[in-house]
Amino acid sequence: MLLPPPAASTLDPRPPSAGPGVVHLFYIHSHITFAVALGVMQHLKLPPADCVVVYDRKYQRALPAGVRVHSLPPRAFVMKTAPWNLWRQIGEQDAEIAALTDHRPYHLYCPHLCIDQVRLLLTNGQCRGYSYLEEGSMSYIDPAHYPYRRYEPKLFVVKYLLSRGRIPNYAPYGERSYERAYVVSPYTFPGMPRLVVLPYPFTKGALPVTAITTGGSDLTGAHLLVMDPVVESHLATRASYELGIALLAEHLTAQRVQRVYYKFHPMQIAVPAGQPYYEELLRRSASGVEWVRLADDVVLEDVAATFADLTFYTIISSMTLYAGFAGHRIYLFARPLLEREPALRVLAAELPPIYWELTTAL
């Protein structure tokens, strides 16, 4: 493990607003937020009956018995819809949360504030306060320089008014009223106070990999491609992505790599129609390489903690950090994309030095 031990802290790890009678409401949409949320429950010794988890992006994993769970249905809180449809959707989410929490006040734990469903949870009258959960690369960027563009002022005003003040124009970490930020490494949220560093969750046996999620394969010594959602996030075009895959294929051929496992990102899993494009791109990219898809419920962070001598390939994924902390090799095939995509360059420029120390660029 390449992480330094957590520094001693006198900070009370429990959020001030999460007192007796308050529900702990966790918004989870990824492997990282799941692991950190579970760490918060364990670290604060929260009774399962006081915990509620809402899942988004079709992400879901088993939780301790007694924790109430709800998958948020996909809702588009868009300004093009008729106002009464927007109000109806907001009312539906409020009713779901009220039923889950028995109408009790809650403290919200969320990855950031630039998701409309999170904003609705934050502006709900039951919310007493909120804290952040580490969620990957985004959590390692200095919040003061995060390359996030808010709505244009006119659009912000329209959305704010149409939602009756329920969807404010928050930047991801721009609001300083958060109570705690729960993280698994001391490199997160540079410059932000009130960090609570939890025990590192991705250690062998902590979140075990099962034969079901790996297909029974022993992945020791495996090569793994992390499918970054840079196209889905509008950070890169397909044309640029294809150039990155071509660079990766050149490396694999030169190194005589025969098999590469690949894993789709939750954003790509949520839109199955886009997956054949990537699978065909991989098949024609490198002759002699067998591409093996890992099941959607595989957790790469758990794989990195369980198996030895792994090699990861990625563009700008948070797996770089967690695989690197576990001592594995990480190669970036980002160069062609960084040369052509300004938005991706801006994001990469804000990543902390530890990110680059853990990687090798192709």
Image: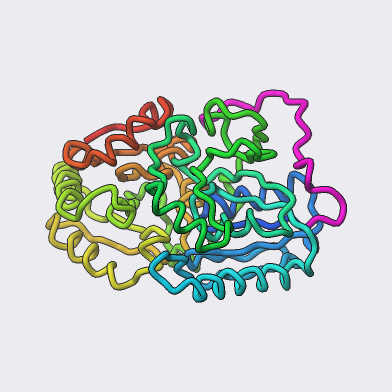
Q: Is residue 18 magenta?
A: yes
Can residue 199 be seen in the rendering of this structure?
no
Quadrant in which residue 351 is drawn? top left
Q: Residue at x 56, y 51 (%)?
A: 33
Can residue 116 be seen in the rendering of this structure?
yes
Q: Is residue 20 magenta?
A: yes
Does 257 appear above or below 197? below
Image location of residue 27, percent across then percent down: 60, 57
Per the rendered image, the range of residues in magenta is 1-22
- Count of numbered circles on the image: 0
Residue 48 lies left or right of residue 323; in this view the side is right
**Residue lying furthest right in this view?**
20
Quadrant in which residue 316 is drawn? top left
Residue 18 lies left or right of residue 182; in this view the side is right
Closer to us: 257 or 206: 206
Image location of residue 186, percent across then percent down: 57, 29
Q: Residue at x 27, y 36 (%)?
A: 345
Where's the C terminus, which quadrant? top left
The dominant secondary structure in magenta is loop
Image location of residue 50, percent across then percent down: 79, 60
Image location of residue 213, percent across then percent down: 48, 65
Q: Residue at x 29, y 52 (%)?
A: 234
Closer to us: 35 or 85: 85
Rendering colour mode: rainbow
Does 209 appear above or below 92? above
Does 171 appear above or below 266? above
Closer to us: 362 or 195: 195
